[in-house]
Amino acid sequence: MTGEREEVWITGLGLVSSVGEGGEAHLAHLARGGPPVLDEERFAPYPVHPLPEIDFSRQIPKRGDLRQMEAWQRIGTYAAGLALEDAGIKGEEALLSRTGLIVAAGSGERDTRTDQMVLEAIAGESAGADDSDSEGGGAAKAILPNEILPSELRPTLFLAQLSNLLAGNISIVHKVTGSSRTFMGEEMAGVAAAEIALKRIGHGQDRIILVGGACNGEREDMLLIFELGHNLLRGAFAPVWERQGAHSGFVMGSQGAFLVLEARSHAEARGAKPYARLSGVTSGRCRRAGEGEAAQSAREQFARLARETRDLAPGPLPVLSGASGTRDATREERAFLEDLGRENFDLAVRAFGSALGHGVEAHFPMGLALAALLTREGAFPPPLDESGMERPLSGAPERILVTGFGHWRGEGLALVEPAM
Amino acid sequence: MPQELTDAKGRPVVAVTGMGLVTPLGRGVADNWDALTRGRSGLKTVSRFPPDGLRTRVAGTVDFMGPSPYSAYGLSLAMAEAVGEGLLAQAGLDAESGFPGPLFVVTPPSEPEWPQLRALFDAAPATSPETYDDLIEAVRTADHRFADMLPGLVNAAMPDALAERFGTKGCPVSVCTACASGASAIQLAVEAIRRGETQAALAIASDGTVHPEGMVRFSLLSALSTHNEPPEKASRPFARDRNGFVIAEGAAAFVLESWEAAQARGARVLGVVRGCGEKADDYHRTRSRPDGSAIIGAIAHALEDAGIAPDAIDYINAHGTGTPENDKMEYLSLHAVFGDAIHQVPISSNKSMIGHTLLAAGGVEAAFSLMTIATGIMPPTINYDEPDPAIPLDVVPNEARQGEVRMVLSNSFGFGGQNVCLVLSAEPEI
């Protein structure tokens, strides 16, 4: 079936991160070689890559729409608008009504103030209750959320908690309504979004799909969840490959990354210029029970990618690595890449998380978007750290491998090449 | 591939060869079908937690399985495992090497549950005032004391546990399209088989989120029925005095495979997924476009994908939530597609008996739709005491009906403008 597949082009990009918005800002930041934009105070001991000042109304003009969204939804809806604009299809209602939508999302945002209020009320109740009457006390505690939540929880905030409501907002604000699917599962949600969009277009099940994700890295409820697994870097910032031992983990980055993926014939028919071609996406899962397992899973994905793209011979291979900086997953990715190096792939690795932070569900779409941008630019940025893991590349990237190792599960790869 | 094994568009026909079900009515397809066709309600006054002070006190909880004390994660996982259990054997697949294809799965989003937040709060350093920072600090300094909370807070965890349990291949794909999710999981599996990527796929949808916050949220959106007494009369789809849905729990699982592969193995075919259609709404976060165009689009796309005209549909398994808005819009949209002929097509709402199983509903109702095809029994819409004159549908009122049903339309709609429709049919005649 491979021979019959239609090429999939990347014809629009919408990028938002700590370094700014749009392709130019990201290219310029990477070309300069940093330094990263950080806020090390607000969530200390966790540094974060904060979102810059953004006038959301430029992509989300109705105040009523903005009021209905929490930050992750604003970032995503804004980036989606940038991508549609960039692809030249913003406001093209007839086309948008048959444009597919695939969003990688996490759990929505909680109202931490309300959570706190309920917890304090429960604590107050417990302090006043007779401890021996544990059953009665338990019931009273259980009822407290019933009393407090109805008055404190705003319906809009509940809607911010629904994972599919980023997609819902994109449909409402930008009129993308051909389909709407939200994938979940942290980093692998972003991989699945790209993989399924590519397959759908490749097999003629769809012609054009808006794909991406968004992450508000400046959220206490999310820091809580990721700290529960001790996944976060604490204290002084260090680039991804320089994070070692106890000083490992990821640094949350606020990010929005959307791509317009389009069948080549569809793009040509409307005269759209491609950034690049998305040649392949593969994903896998292993138990990660022992050292080397995830690296092996990635090697299998690489072999599949080589089969599917028929174009992965040894030689120069620029890599946009989605390595997060968590100890085990990053060690596995390093082992995988070092293996490729031994197989005569001349690697130029850039862990873009060193510059933008970790965008979780949005991270893989961000890697794809940066790869598309750099492919069209015909330049690859200088190393993002001094670990020795990232070596300079001279000349234009003729292909870019994008990696996406989940911080806990899943290994994904993609190949981006110039569109001929 | 022989002509008969592909559909009119030249794609592999996708058969269902295994099916599992849990709803408030019980565990297993047979028990559920028996109760459902008798018109029994699975809805009760909530006993899991004191519902005092809540406007709605009735729900369709699954109380006969899952961990004690309850957790949304624990119950959802237990139900997902239960519906997937034994499906390999049912489909006649070799269980040795696990399920021979990918997993498309629907699970509730991970979020901290109140007992967990309380445990963290109790462990947090006492500052004044206490803040979320303190909870984070409790976690940071606690080493691995709270590690057992982790699976419930990582979205990949439940899909991963199910992939491990059933030996599915590749990275599980976890989908959320709100209350259409169950149908989306089936659709993703059908598409993968049609692309020729795999011969078989496992689709599982599970939702066990009846907890105070869950009820408060939907209550705030004025979406829940307040007919608290008697609880079995709380869900009244298509009736004049309906005033909301009843939140419920359940799960469904399906083995989907190319009909050719199923036949080659001599597997018993439970039905065929003939078509899938979707269309997103751009009108409002919780309401559909007043002209019904998105719902109409989803229905039309499903019929088109199945390669059939509306008159081929023998019965409709309605989304039928029992909210004033949904039932009105569902009728309006069906009428737009079917014309006046819709008044003669039997349509019933399983939610009148099991409530709204939310993320699992599209799966649960697809399973019941396939049972209708297999047995020729159309389950009733119960509590239909007072017809809504604005919705002149044949809702199979109060008692099940017998008839030949070869082609079913199953509707699933969700907040966020999600609309997914499936066309399910009997095995094609060669």
Image: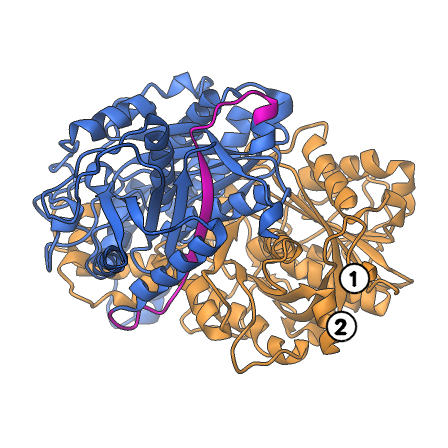
Chain colours: A blue, B orange
| Label 2: chain letter | B
Q: Which residue is drawn at 66% across and 43% down?
A: B323
In the visual, does B141 lie left or right of B358?
left
Q: Do labels 1 and 2 share a chain?
A: yes
> Viewer-proximal residue, B67 or B94?
B94
- Residue B266 is drawn in which quadrant? bottom right
The reply to whether residue A173 is visible in this rendering is yes
Q: Which residue is drawn at 10% across and 48% down?
A: A387
Q: Residue A196 in the image: x percent, y percent?
A: 52, 48
- The residue type indicated by label 1 comes to Leu
Looking at the picture, does residue B260 appear above or below residue A113? below
Q: Residue B126 in the image: x percent, y percent?
A: 12, 53
Q: How far apart are marks 1 and 2 (CA)?
A: 9 Å
Residue that carries the numbered disc 1 in the rendered image: B5
CB under 8 Å between callouts 1 and 2? Answer: yes
Secondary structure of the residue carrying numbered label 1? helix
- The residue type indicated by label 2 comes to Gln
> Viewer-proximal residue, B148 or B95?
B95
| Label 1: chain letter | B
Q: How many labels does the image show?
A: 2
Looking at the picture, does residue A101 appear above or below residue B322? above
Q: Which residue is drawn at 35% across and 61% down?
A: A299
Secondary structure of the residue carrying numbered label 2? helix
In the visual, does B268 lie left or right of A306?
right
Q: Residue A66 in the image: x percent, y percent?
A: 42, 25
Tell me which segment is drawn in magenta. A268-291
Q: Residue B329 in the image: x percent, y percent?
A: 72, 36
Q: Give the class, few, some or many, for how many residues have Cα within 10 Å of label 2's Cα (few <14, many ≥20).
A: some
Residue that carries the numbered disc 2 in the rendered image: B263
